[in-house]
Amino acid sequence: MITVFLADDHETVREGLRLLVNAQPDMTVIAEAGDGATAVQRACISRPQVIVLDLAMPEMNGLSAAKALRESLPGSAIVTLTRHSDRAYAQQLFAAGAQGYVLKQSPSRELLRAIRQTAAGERYVDPALRQDGWNWSPAPGRAGNITSRETDVLRLVAVGHSNKEIGAELGISVKTVEANLSRVYTKLGIRSRVELASGLANGPEPDPGRATQR
């Protein structure tokens, strides 16, 4: 039996997910949370095999929660469930320690597949993001956590800012921006800014920490 933890700030969404998961003969929901901070606390107590994590939640967004959960619960698989089809966000979540990335607009069977595969130690990427031969594997031996500064830089690159604009926004020099980008590309297995841009599925979207779209 695969034990599952649900984290989503919409109660109706959690109820639907609970019914879906509990209807499977090999899964059961053991705990839930409506915000990121509570999710980290309750997951550490319940210690599920799989954590289904919404990307945009109050108190702590999905990226921060994934990092905290990976550090506290290295044995639990994290599956991100979101409407964000931007590959840059998915790459950030995988670098932060998630094993699965599923779109809410996909059929429910994709979430069930993600839960089963990640519980078995495999990575799962929604079929909508597996097109065009995109490489989801981090560079060998270089999948270390992305720092908060690198995350800020990558977020601004993803929405189309130039290095000069990023420097002005973050209060750092253009050379510092370039250095951060170089480290991020290495960690994510991305070779250039052009390759990152070509991997964006649906154009720029809001910062996952501030997003209102679920």
Image: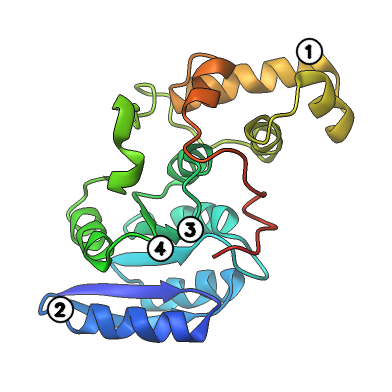
Secondary structure under the numbered disc 3 in the rendered image:
loop
- Counting from the top left corner in percent of width and height, residue 145 is at 52, 37
| Residue at left offset 39%, top offset 86% | 15
| Residue at left offset 54%, top offset 79% | 34
Secondary structure under the numbered disc 4 in the rendered image:
loop
- Asked whether the beta carbons under mark 4 and mark 1 sit within 8 Å of each other, the answer is no
Rendering colour mode: rainbow
The amino acid pointed to by label 2 is: Gln
Mark 3–mark 2 Cα distance, whole angstroms, equals 24 Å
- The residue beneath circle 4 is 104
- The residue beneath circle 3 is 83
Check the image and report above or below for 121 versus 50. Answer: above
Q: Earlier in the sequence, mark 1 or mark 2?
A: 2
213 sits left or right of 143 in the view: right
**Residue 30 is at least partly visible in this image:** no
- Counting from the top left corner in percent of width and height, residue 83 is at 48, 58
Residue 24 image label: 2
Q: Earlier in the sequence, mark 3 or mark 2?
A: 2
Mark 2–mark 4 Cα distance, whole angstroms, equals 19 Å
Check the image and report above or below for 133 versus 8. Answer: above
Mark 1–mark 3 Cα distance, whole angstroms, equals 34 Å
Q: Earlier in the sequence, mark 4 or mark 1?
A: 4
Q: Mark 1 Cα within 10 Å, few/some/many (few <14, many 20+)? A: few
Q: Mark 2 Cα within 10 Å, few/some/many (few <14, many 20+)? A: few
- The residue beneath circle 1 is 175
Location of residue 73 by image quarter = bottom left
The label nearer to you, 3 versus 2, is: 3
- Counting from the top left corner in percent of width and height, residue 94 is at 43, 42
The amino acid pointed to by label 1 is: Lys
The label nearer to you, 2 versus 4, is: 4
The label nearer to you, 4 versus 1, is: 4
Check the image and report above or below for 162 versus 12. Answer: above
